[in-house]
Image (cartoon, rainbow, N blue to C red):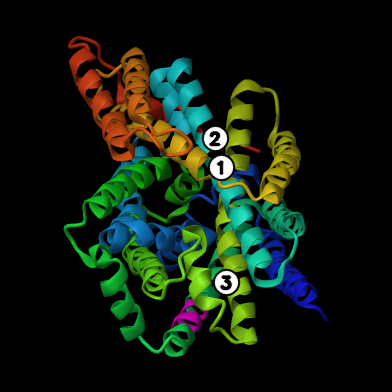
Amino acid sequence: MSAEQVILALLLVGGGFAAVVGVAHARGRVATIEDYITARRSLGTWVTTTTLVASGMGAWILFSPAEAATWGGLVAILGYGLGAAAPLLIFIFLGRRLRQLIPEGHSLTEYVWHRYGSGLYALTLIVTLFYMFIFLAAEITAIALIAKLVAGVPLWLTAFVVIVITFAYTIYGGLRASVLTDVVQAALILPLLAALLLVGYQALGGFQPGLAGLSERAPQLLDFGHPMGWQAALTFIIAISAANLFHQGYWQRVYAARDERTLGASFLLAALAVIPLVVVMGLFGLAAVGLDRVDHPSVALFSVLLEVLPPALLLALILLGLVLAMSSIDSLLNGIASLVVVEAGRFMRGANGARLLRLSRWLSVLLALPLLWVASQGYSVLYLFLLANLACTAAAFPVFYGLYSQRYTGKVAIWSMLAGLVAGGLLFPDPAMTRGHLLGAFVLAAVVPVMVSLALTPRRTAFDLESLKSHVRAFRD
């Protein structure tokens, strides 16, 4: 068999196994639309923690942390790790609050609709769907690029295989299938990472060669006072934190946690787990600089490992990329499907659960077509990711301030969000990154909405937050 055939066989066997596990678990357990989109109050601490880690750790960890390290250094790596963990910590407080106010809820957009009205709801829905689509496209592109780097597999072929397999079990089994496959995938991720790190460390001769070369070629990357590193770290913390607050997959898991204690413990443990994973992946970027193998920063990890890993470990690298991508893809896809159900149910009041479920599944199938096209092109979606992150940053305070303030209104929230977008957009870099200031853009997008909100919030208006309980009900099949 050729290398391409071996890789495709691995993708089919590994992905097929996950699909069989997901479908088998969902069979008989997805009796209602509630089972499909929330699995409400059914997950314990260990399962919730595992699915959070697997859902958040997509194939991006094989690319982005190492790339950031090549120009931002050690400080950027630490900032990336904190940025990945920060939203999970924030969810502890926001998730508990939303469960208290809307115990039978399903999504963030439900809250926005009833708390603020149609204006901010439309903006929030657009931001959420745009962010999650870009995230999906990035994950599918990432695994396609890994297969091409290792064995020259055409991008479209890998993308097609991954889309078909992942969509099959996710569309059929919903959140329950996604959660179980996350548990299985997490059990594979850690051993595979450990094996790659151990073999890579030994093959490279330990830390000394990389450190020596790094001290000679780019000593600033090890300096905790490196200005570029601090800019990158702060940007990551702001951007990633804000963006993940609009990840519907996380909100599903907020409601799937058995109780508030489970929610708090699970999100805390997941946050503690992702920091070392991201930091370790970022160290490969420093190694690439030290070993003078950084011609293409976006694939810094692969430039270090591909030359030293034996064939069996190259297969393990492919399998790791597949597992990471699928764990993230199924969560994103099911998050989008759940939004379709919730929002369609709002406007199709006569539709029963079965009809909403069919609609969700067909729209998910249609979503596969543009995703396949984007992934087959091999585009870098970094700039679109940054744009989506900026929109999420501008929306974060206006959307969530209403969880605590009774005087805050939908009109003020809209003006605050738009002001943040304009302020951040004025400093946002162009696609070539030749002008603008990325950190400044995100700081303005985060701070301006706070200032506008506090300045314009009326003193006499009062919204009864407790009334939200009566507005949102579980679906009754």
Q: Which mark is residue 130?
A: 2
Q: Secondary structure at mark 3?
A: helix
212 part of magenta stretch = no
Are the residues at dot 2 and dot 1 in contact (C-beta closer than 8 Å)?
yes
Q: Secondary structure at mark 1?
A: helix
Vertical relation: 296 (above or below) 436:
below
Q: Residue at x 72, y 37 (%)?
A: 363
| Image side of residue 169 versus residue 436, left or right | right
Q: Extreme front residue here? A: 216
Q: Quadrant of residue 238?
A: top left
Of residues 142 and 19, the one nearer the viewer is 142
| Image side of residue 290 versus residue 194, left or right | left
Q: Amino acid at mark 1?
A: Ile
Q: Amino acid at mark 2?
A: Phe
Judged by its main secondary structure, the magenta piece is: helix
- Percent position (x, y) of residue 445? 31, 30
Q: Which residue is mark 3?
A: 320
Q: Amino acid at mark 3?
A: Leu
Q: Which mark is residue 134?
A: 1
Q: Residue at x 43, y 29 (%)?
A: 111
- Percent position (x, y) of residue 434? 40, 37
Q: Residues within 10 Å of mark 1 (few under 14, many from 20)?
A: some
- Bounds of the magenta span? 191-197
Classify the position of the N terminus by image quarter. bottom right
